[in-house]
Amino acid sequence: MSSLFTREQRWLSVDEVERELQTDALKGGKEHRVALLPGRNLVLKVADARKLATESLFDYLSDLLLSNYFFDDEIQLLGGMLEGGRLQVVITQPYIDGVHPEWEELKASLIRQNLRDPAPRSLGGNFVLDDDLLGEVDVFDLHPNNVIQDVTGWLHPIDAHFYFDDRAARMTALKTLGLLI
């Protein structure tokens, strides 16, 4: 990752990113510190690579690609920074004006958006998406704090994760979808 950020000149200034995080801070989660980027309708998200809810940094970054693909998100990797010797990944994501729906509304709306709830009595936030190219795709972490309902009632997952049996299956899926060359 370090060589990618160096090659692409994507190392970011800790001071500048911290200033942005403090200017218009939003409530983050366990993985991200979050701020609104004024005048740009974007959210800045900073994730400590060691606190990610994924198996690896590769899984996290490929989850961002999959979110862009499946949920028409526009997540962009800005780069990285070293803070206290720890890698921080910095991304932007469109700001969605809306609310975090309660579980029952979230579940009903995701089902209307063609996701299936494999465990209807569970509160786990795990769903299945049927894709023409991949078949069943397991999507998890779609709990109320990770989904925003806009004014039209449409749900926007803001921190979705995707499960694959192993790295090879993830790579095959990314290649099949044209997300990895």
Image (cartoon, helix red, strand yellow):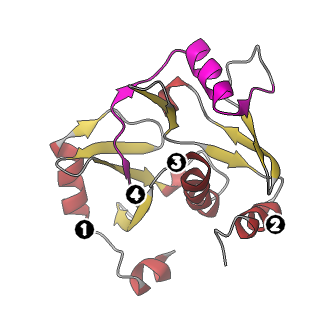
Q: Earlier in the sequence, mark 3 or mark 1?
A: 1
Q: CA distance from mark 3 to mark 4?
A: 15 Å
Which region of the structure is painted magenta? 91-118
Label 1 residue SS: loop
Tell me the residue that label 1 is attached to: 13
Q: Are marks 3 and 4 in contact (CB under 8 Å)?
A: no
Q: CA distance from mark 4 to mark 2?
A: 25 Å
Q: Is residue 180 above or below residue 116?
A: below
Identified by mark 1, the residue type is: Ser
Identified by mark 3, the residue type is: Lys
Which residue is drawn at the image coordinates 75% and 61% (left, top)? 170
Q: Of the numbered discs in the image, which one, if any, rests on residue 51? A: 3
Which residue is drawn at the image coordinates 70% and 34% (left, top)? 114
Residue density around tag 3, few if under 14, some if 14–19, many if 20 or more, within 10 Å: few
103 falls in the magenta region: yes
Q: What x and y, as percent, mark residue 91?
A: 40, 57
Q: Is residue 35 left or right of residue 38?
A: right
Q: Is residue 31 left or right of residue 115?
A: left
Which residue is drawn at the image coordinates 19% and 44% (left, top)? 22
Q: Of the numbered discs in the image, which one, if any, rests on residue 168? A: 2
Label 4 residue SS: strand
Identified by mark 4, the residue type is: Ile
Q: Earlier in the sequence, mark 2 or mark 1?
A: 1
- Name the image quarter holding residue 82: bottom left
Residue density around tag 2, few if under 14, some if 14–19, many if 20 or more, within 10 Å: few
